[in-house]
Image (cartoon, rainbow, N blue to C red):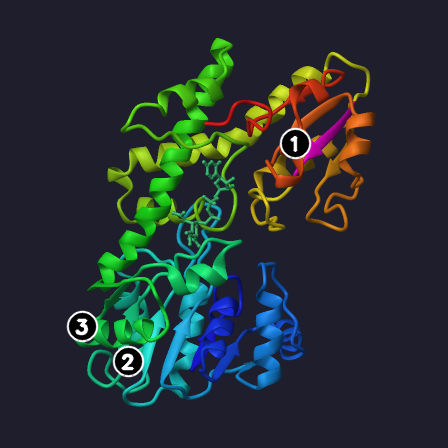
């Protein structure tokens, strides 16, 4: 089989399939990525993936190639970002579909795993596949099976998550469901391509809206001088209430992006989804305002940021609100910044040295806790009495 796109979803999926007995050709545009993988190494960060790739490459079941090769099954796992004006950018999906046209043979299955706006499979991908002369739904099977894996737990979730598959036709759905049932332990649900497309977007938009609610509550509590963590903890004692955690914003490549795909499909009908995006996007600025407010009380204070990644216990910096906050502080001539990030060897911010937690606690005037990494969870307020603290993740508060 052939996996197009060897990124955060494609590479783990390719490695898992290679491990359960498939012969996998992984395709990527970047030569350096191909070389890294063919040397048995990886270019992304995901627990235990390195060992899996090393073993699969050594066993000859996984190889990385520049162009798609004929296969019974093709998986398209390329990124689908948004443009600066929040429109879906489907160039990589389009390019991948074009690239696999020469490799298509009658009877093969093409699965789009990338997250896409409703209608993409039928209106964008199917015509490109049809340009091969093979008719999708008759000569080749075409379906959408959105990836749903959580960064940091991908190897488990690729196999264990329930899946939604939606084909161009019922026969496409059936064929795609059989493929996933051959290795996935979670239930495989069958539907149409459009329902599969929208349900994936709905999952991430649901989470975004719920995080925005928690963040809005944090904004309200800051204004009223109340402890948001206590408010949430108590509200969550209601049997039908489960408020998520406020934080410095929403990072990663999915939750901050996918709601825009729904908004683009129905701009007039998505005021809630669009407002949630705004609330979450404004959170880093709120945190910065709090820090600057404290910093203004001192002369060129030493500020230490704890955590830079986009969420706890991973080393992924993609669209990290913590990194955004730290970068803005590093650019401020009125203060001196250092960063503590147990998941990195070097500071990604040239002006802000990477220091250990103990040194940061000893040296800093202001502590900004941006990520609740496991390595910080032993901290208690009475360890920090000599410091001013900004704690948007509630590390020091009773967590709900
Ligand atoms: N966050 C909060 N408060 C919370 C929960 C999360 O501020 O209560 C923040 C995190 O700190 C992080 C961001 O939200 O910055 C997103 O983190 P996440 O762990 O919620 O999700 P992702 O982006 O790592 O992965 C999501 C997952 N989707 C859902 O949980 C609905 C994953 O299953 C998807 O496969 C993935 O997006 C994707 O690729 O679409």
- Which residue is depicted at the point 44% across and 67% down? 77
Work out how far the residue at label 2 is from the one at label 1, CA to CA, in angstroms.
58 Å
Label disc, if present, on residue 378 of the rendered structure: 1
Residue 357 or residue 287, whichever sits in front = 357
- Please give the range of residues in magenta: 302-307
Label disc, if present, on residue 169 of the rendered structure: 3
Front of the two marks 1 and 3 = 1
Front of the two marks 2 and 1 = 1
**SS at mark 3?**
loop
**SS at mark 1?**
loop
Earlier along the polypeptide chain: callout 1 or callout 3?
A: 3
Q: Quadrant of ligand 1?
A: top left
- Which residue is depicted at the point 79% across and 33% down? 358
Q: Where's the N terminus, which quadrant?
A: bottom left
Mark 1, residues whose alpha carbon is within 10 Å: few (<14), some, or many (≥20)? few
- Which residue is depicted at the point 76% across and 16% down? 386
- The secondary structure making up most of the magenta span is strand
Give residue 65's quadrant in the image. bottom right
Work out how far the residue at label 2 is from the one at label 3, CA to CA, in angstroms.
14 Å
Label disc, if present, on residue 130 of the rendered structure: 2
Mark 2, residues whose alpha carbon is within 10 Å: few (<14), some, or many (≥20)? some
Q: Position of residue 235 (x, y in %)?
A: 36, 21
In the picture provided, is 235 more to the left or to the right than 299? left
């Amino acid at each position: 089989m052939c996996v197009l796109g060897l990124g955060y979803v494609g590479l783990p999926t390719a490695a898992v399939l290679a491990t359960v007995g498939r012969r996998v050709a992984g395709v990527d545009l970047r030569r350096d990525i191909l070389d890294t993988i063919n040397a048995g190494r990886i270019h992304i960060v995901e627990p235990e993936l390195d060992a899996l790739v090393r073993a699969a490459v050594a066993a000859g079941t996984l190889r990385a190639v520049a162009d798609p090769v004929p296969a019974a099954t093709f998986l398209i796992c390329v990124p689908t970002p948004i443009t600066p004006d929040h429109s879906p950018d489907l160039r990589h999906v389009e390019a991948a579909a074009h690239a696999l046209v020469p490799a298509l043979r009658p009877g093969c299955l093409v699965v789009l795993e990338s997250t896409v706006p409703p209608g993409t499979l039928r209106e964008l991908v199917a015509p490109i596949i049809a340009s091969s002369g093979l008719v999708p739904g008759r000569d080749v099977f075409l379906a959408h099976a959105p990836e749903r894996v959580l960064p940091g737990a991908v190897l488990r979730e690729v196999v264990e998550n329930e899946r939604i598959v939606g084909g161009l036709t019922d026969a496409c759905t059936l064929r795609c469901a059989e493929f996933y049932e051959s290795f996935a332990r979670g239930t495989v649900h069958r539907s149409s391509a459009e329902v599969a497309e929208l349900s994936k977007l709905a999952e991430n938009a649901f989470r975004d809206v719920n995080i925005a609610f928690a963040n809005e509550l944090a904004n309200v509590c800051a204004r009223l001088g109340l402890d948001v963590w206590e408010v949430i903890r108590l509200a969550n004692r209601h049997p039908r209430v489960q408020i998520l955690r406020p934080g410095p914003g929403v990072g990663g490549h999915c939750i901050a992006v996918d709601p825009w795909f729904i908004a683009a499909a129905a701009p007039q009908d998505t005021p809630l989804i669009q407002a949630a995006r705004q609330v979450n996007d404004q959170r880093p600025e709120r945190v910065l305002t709090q820090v600057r407010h404290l910093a203004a009380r001192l002369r060129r204070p030493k500020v230490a940021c704890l955590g830079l990644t986009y969420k706890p216990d991973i080393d992924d910096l993609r669209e990290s609100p913590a990194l955004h906050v730290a970068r803005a502080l590093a650019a401020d001539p009125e203060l001196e910044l250092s960063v503590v990030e147990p998941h990195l060897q070097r500071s990604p911010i040239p002006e802000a040295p990477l220091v250990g937690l103990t040194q940061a606690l000893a040296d800093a005037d202001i502590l900004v806790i941006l990520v609740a990494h496991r390595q910080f969870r032993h901290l208690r307020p009475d360890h920090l009495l000599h410091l001013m603290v900004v704690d948007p993740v509630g590390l020091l508060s009773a967590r709900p």
